């Protein structure tokens, strides 16, 4: 998501940099392009209009016009505006109850049940002991889906069945959480194909029974402005505390994310960025604005890396980098961790200007990573520890064993040696080892 919008912003800023001195006419032209980019990204037209007006007012100030780097000043202004449109400062998640109750609401098909499991998994990683509650007793197989997801994540689930009154499920789930010493209750609710009185009445009844600290509205970002309309309707009927955007890894244009908070006044709390149980991110407006403008999101990248590697392993890796002892076995281990962090294009999008600087080959993708893995696994343990012994005959054997060509193996070894030299140099200069990624 946001890829097309990011490209259009990049072209606008590139055009501004092409002028030795920026005049009002240049800025007005750029603002027209920004407005068109937002509208084409399916941003609410009122939000786009107000945002461009605020950006224009600041960009036409003398500080920008007289600056030696006016393009950078305008990028800063646009970034600040995007942060505000996306919600400003993150709102702390309230888990003060005993147990703390999080109620999940939304339309059918928005991804509520999947999100409920992802949230429980996320909270457990933060030290909580969550209990999932299967409260969607109408959709076929909804209870089974939640049970399967809970099992995958090794999360406790309360799923008494579909023939039990919802009020009984709500009451008993609280007692179950207290009996099992669960400090957090994640309550999945039923959705409808559209908002109706029966649905809202039912949600209101559950809310009165479980008294949730948080009510999260799950919206499908692929539906664009329809998601904003749904949020407005829910806002009228039930006082939700935050928004969750699903399918942000898809090809949606981003209009929902850039409109929903401005229109409803409710913050985006989480974003689902994939189908795996761990593909959930806490939503940070400043970080998302940085991604949209191609400024990267190093903090989120660091957080993902820290989740896949313990401190002891990081210190061991640092030692190997300093002593130039980083091997292909370590490289393979890093590759596995990289794959567990999420899709490669998402990770590259978090590194400021990575692709633009040519630091990563443009054809590197999931299939290329699998090929690299196959080549390394076709080596003997001795060859992985000391690749200098890999001569011509060994290269032919490795190529045959991995289903690749000798040239592809040669390219991998060359890139590995280049990476190892760079890692050693950077670790010495910085005083500590940088995060290591293949081809970084």
Image (cartoon, rainbow, N blue to C red):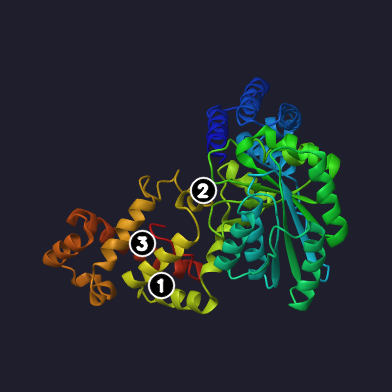
Q: Element type at marker 3?
A: helix
Furthest-front residue in this view: 163
- Please state which of residues 110 and 201 is positioned toward the viewer in this rendering: 201
Mark 3 against mark 2, which lies toward the viewer?
Answer: 2
- Determine which of the numbered discs, if any, sits on residue 52 in the image: none
Residue carrying label 1: 321
* Residue 192 quadrant: top right
Q: Identify residue for label 3.
A: 419
Residue drawn at x 23%, y 59% is 409
Q: CA distance from mark 3 to mark 1?
A: 10 Å
The N terminus, quarter of image = top right
Mark before the other along the chain sequence, 1 or 2: 1
How packed is label 2: few (under 14 Cα within 10 Å), some, or many (20 or more)?
many
Coordinates of residue 440 in the picture (x, y in percent): 42, 57
Q: Earlier in the sequence, mark 3 or mark 1?
A: 1
Between discs 3 and 2, the one toward the N terminus: 2
Label 2, on which residue? Answer: 349
Circle 2 sits in a helix, a strand or a loop, which is it?
A: helix
Badge 1 density bin: few <14, some 14–19, many ≥20, Cα 10 Å: many
The answer to whether 181 is drawn above or below residue 287 in the figure is below
Which residue shows up at 22% across the image and 55% down it? 404
Q: Residue at x 52, y 68 (%)?
A: 308
Residues 386 and 370: in front is 370
* Gap between marks 1 and 2 measured at Cα: 25 Å
Q: Is residue 93 above or below residue 38?
A: below
């Amino acid at each position: 998501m946001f890829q097309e919008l990011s490209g259009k912003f990049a072209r606008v800023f590139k055009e501004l940099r092409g002028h030795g001195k920026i005049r009002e006419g240049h800025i007005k032209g750029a603002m027209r392009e920004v407005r068109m980019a937002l509208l084409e990204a399916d941003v609410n037209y009122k939000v786009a209009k107000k945002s461009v007006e605020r950006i224009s007012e600041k960009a036409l100030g003398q500080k920008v016009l007289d600056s030696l780097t006016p393009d950078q000043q305008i990028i800063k202004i646009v970034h600040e505006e995007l942060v505000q449109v996306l919600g400003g400062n993150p709102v702390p998640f309230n888990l003060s109850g005993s147990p703390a109750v999080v109620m999940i609401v939304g339309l059918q098909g928005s991804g509520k049940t999947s999100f409920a499991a992802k949230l429980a998994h996320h909270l457990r990683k933060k030290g909580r002991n969550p209990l999932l509650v299967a409260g969607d007793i109408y959709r076929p197989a909804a209870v089974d889906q939640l049970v399967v997801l809970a099992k995958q994540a090794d999360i406790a689930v309360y799923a008494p069945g579909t023939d039990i009154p919802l009020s009984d499920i709500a009451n008993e789930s609280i007692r179950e959480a207290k009996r099992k010493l669960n400090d957090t209750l994640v309550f999945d609710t039923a959705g409808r194909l559209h908002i109706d009185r029966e649905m809202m009445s039912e949600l209101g009844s559950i809310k009165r029974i479980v008294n949730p600290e948080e009510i999260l509205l799950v919206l499908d970002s692929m539906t664009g402005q329809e998601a904003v309309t749904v949020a407005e309707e829910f806002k009228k009927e039930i006082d939700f505390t935050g928004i969750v955007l699903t399918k942000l890894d898809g090809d949606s244009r981003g209009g929902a994310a850039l409109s929903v908070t401005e229109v409803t006044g409710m913050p985006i709390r989480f974003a689902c960025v994939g189908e795996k149980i761990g593909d959930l991110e806490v939503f940070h407006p400043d970080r998302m604005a940085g991604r949209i403008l191609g400024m990267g999101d190093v903090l989120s990248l660091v957080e993902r890396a820290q989740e896949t590697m313990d401190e002891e392993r990081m210190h061991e890796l640092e030692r190997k980098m300093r002593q130039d002892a980083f091997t292909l076995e370590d490289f393979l281990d890093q590759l596995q961790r990289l794959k567990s962090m999420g899709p490669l294009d998402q990770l590259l999008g978090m590194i400021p200007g990575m692709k633009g600087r040519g630091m990563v080959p443009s054809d590197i993708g999931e299939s290329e990573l699998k090929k690299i893995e196959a080549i390394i696994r076709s080596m003997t343990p001795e060859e992985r520890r000391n690749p200098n012994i890999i001569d011509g005959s060994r290269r032919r054997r490795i190529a045959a064993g991995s289903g690749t060509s000798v040239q592809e193996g040669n390219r991998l070894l060359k890139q590995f040696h280049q990476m190892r030299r760079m890692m050693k140099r950077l670790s010495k200069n910085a005083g500590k080892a940088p995060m290591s990624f293949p081809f970084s």
